[in-house]
C-alpha cells in the first residue's frame, strides 16, 4: 500500500511539474535572440544604443538565476548610454546546453566567446556576478582579445571550505537526482523561492516583486535545476585548477564585493583574487551583502565608464 501511495504521489508531482514548466515558460518567454554555439545555445538580449562609443558591456549572471538579475537595475541603467549585452548562461533562462553534468567554467567561457564572435562583439567590458566570476576570469585568460576590461561582482574565484548544499549533491546523483528534479523540485522550490531570494540579499532587503521581475521561477524547470546543481557541485574543483593562473591576467580588472556577503566570502575570493591579478582594483562595500549590483549600481557604472574611457584613449596614446 505504501509503495502504491508513493508512486501515485510521484506521478501527481511529475504532472504538476510539467504543468508548472508550461506556465513559467509562457509567463517568461525569451526576449532576445537564440545563438547556437558548440555544445548548446545561448539566449542573448541587446539593449541600449548599438552605435554607442567605446566597447559594449557584457553582463553575465551567477547561479540559480538568469540574465534578468543583471538587467535590473544595472543593465537598464548602463543601457541609457551604452550598448549592453545580456546573456543567459548555457542551461539557464532560455540558454541550453547539450551535456548537463559536463559544463565547466572553461566550457561556458568558450561558448560565450563563440556567441560574442557570432555577434561581432570584440572587445567588450565583461561584468560577471557570483559563480560567473570563475568563467569571467577564464575569459580574461583564454580570450583576452574579447575582454577590454573585467568587472568582478562578488565573484567566485577560489576553493572554499564546505560544500554547496546537500540537495544539490543529492540531485546530481544517478537516478534519484533526475527523479527529484522531475517531481518534487518545482512544487517545493516554488514555495521556497522567496525565502531563498531574501537570504541572498541579506542584510539588504530584497526589492518588492524581484522574483517575478527577474523570471527566477525558470530555474525550477528540471533541466535548468539540474544544470544549476551540476554547476555548483563541480565548481570547487574547477577553481582549484584555474586559480594558479590568475597572475597571468593582463586585462584591466576591478573587483567589487560586499563586506557582509555570506554567500561568497569576500576574504576567500575577492580579496585574494585582487591581490593575485596584477594591477587589479579592489572595492569592498561596508555592510553590503551578495547582491552588489542592486546595492551599488551607480558605483559599478562609474567603474565601467572609467574602463570604457581608458579603452577609448589607448589607441590614441599608442599612436602618439
Image: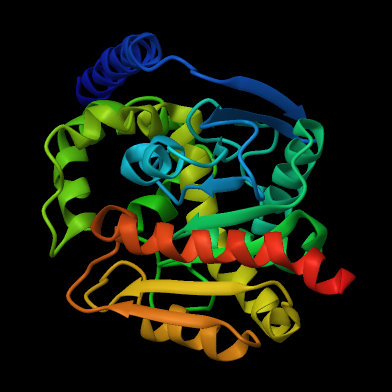
The residue drawn where x is 24% and y is 26% is: 187
Q: Is residue 269 above or below residue 11?
A: below
Q: Is residue 162 above or below residue 111?
A: below
Near-viewer residue (245 or 230): 245
Asked which quadrant contains residue 282, the reply is bottom left
Q: Is residue 90 above or below residue 276?
A: above
Q: Residue 9, percent across and down?
A: 24, 19
Q: Can residue 95 be spotted in the picture?
A: no
Q: Can residue 287 be spotted in the picture?
A: yes
Furthest toward the right, the residue is 319
Please indicate whether residue 97 sits to the left or right of residue 61 in the image: right
Please indicate whether residue 16 sits to the left or right of residue 143 in the image: left
Q: Residue 197, percent across and down?
A: 21, 47
Please indicate whether residue 24 sits to the left or right of residue 248 in the image: left
How many marks overall? 0
Q: Residue 119, percent across and down?
A: 75, 32
Furthest toward the front, the residue is 320
Near-viewer residue (38 or 80): 80
Q: Residue 279, percent across and down?
A: 62, 86
Asked which quadrant contains residue 28, the reply is top left
Q: Which quadrant of the rendered structure holds the N terminus?
A: top left
Q: Which colour assignment does the render follow?
A: rainbow
Asked which quadrant contains residue 15, the reply is top left
The residue drawn where x is 73% and y is 81% is: 245
Q: Which quadrant of the rendered structure holds the C terminus?
A: bottom right
The residue drawn where x is 38% and y is 86% is: 267
Please indicate whether residue 279 sits to the left or right of residue 165 in the image: right
The residue drawn where x is 56% and y is 35% is: 91
Furthest toward the bottom, the residue is 275
Amino acid at each position: 500500500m505504501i509503495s502504491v501511495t508513493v508512486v501515485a504521489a510521484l506521478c501527481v508531482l511529475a504532472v504538476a511539474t510539467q504543468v508548472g514548466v508550461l506556465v513559467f515558460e509562457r509567463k517568461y518567454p525569451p526576449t532576445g535572440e537564440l545563438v547556437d554555439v558548440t555544445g548548446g545555445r545561448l539566449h542573448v538580449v541587446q539593449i541600449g544604443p548599438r552605435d554607442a562609443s567605446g566597447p559594449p558591456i557584457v553582463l553575465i549572471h551567477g547561479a540559480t538565476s538568469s540574465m534578468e538579475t543583471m538587467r535590473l537595475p544595472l543593465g537598464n541603467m548602463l543601457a541609457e548610454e551604452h550598448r549592453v549585452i545580456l546573456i543567459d548562461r548555457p542551461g539557464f533562462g532560455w540558454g541550453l546546453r547539450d551535456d548537463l553534468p559536463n559544463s565547466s567554467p572553461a566550457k561556458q567561457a568558450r561558448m560565450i566567446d563563440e556567441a560574442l564572435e557570432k555577434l561581432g562583439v570584440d572587445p567588450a567590458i565583461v561584468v560577471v556576478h557570483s559563480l560567473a566570476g570563475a568563467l569571467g576570469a577564464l575569459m580574461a585568460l583564454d580570450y583576452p582579445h574579447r575582454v577590454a576590461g573585467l568587472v568582478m561582482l562578488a565573484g567566485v574565484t577560489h576553493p572554499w571550505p564546505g560544500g554547496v548544499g546537500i540537495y544539490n549533491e543529492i540531485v546530481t546523483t544517478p537516478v534519484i537526482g533526475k527523479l527529484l528534479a522531475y517531481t518534487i523540485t518545482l512544487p517545493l522550490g516554488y514555495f521556497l523561492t522567496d525565502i531563498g531570494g531574501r537570504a541572498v540579499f541579506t542584510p539588504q532587503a530584497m526589492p518588492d516583486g524581484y522574483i517575478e521581475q527577474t523570471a527566477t521561477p525558470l530555474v525550477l524547470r528540471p533541466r535548468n535545476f539540474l544544470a544549476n546543481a551540476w554547476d555548483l557541485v563541480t565548481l570547487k574543483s574547477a577553481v582549484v585548477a584555474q586559480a594558479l593562473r590568475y597572475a597571468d591576467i593582463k586585462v584591466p580588472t576591478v573587483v567589487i564585493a560586499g563586506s557582509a556577503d555570506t554567500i561568497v566570502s569576500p576574504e576567500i575570493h575577492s580579496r585574494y583574487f585582487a591581490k593575485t591579478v596584477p594591477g587589479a582594483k579592489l572595492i569592498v562595500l561596508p555592510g553590503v551583502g551578495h547582491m552588489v549590483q542592486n546595492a551599488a549600481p551607480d558605483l559599478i557604472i562609474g567603474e565601467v565608464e572609467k574602463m570604457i574611457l581608458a579603452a577609448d584613449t589607448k589607441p590614441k596614446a599608442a599612436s602618439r
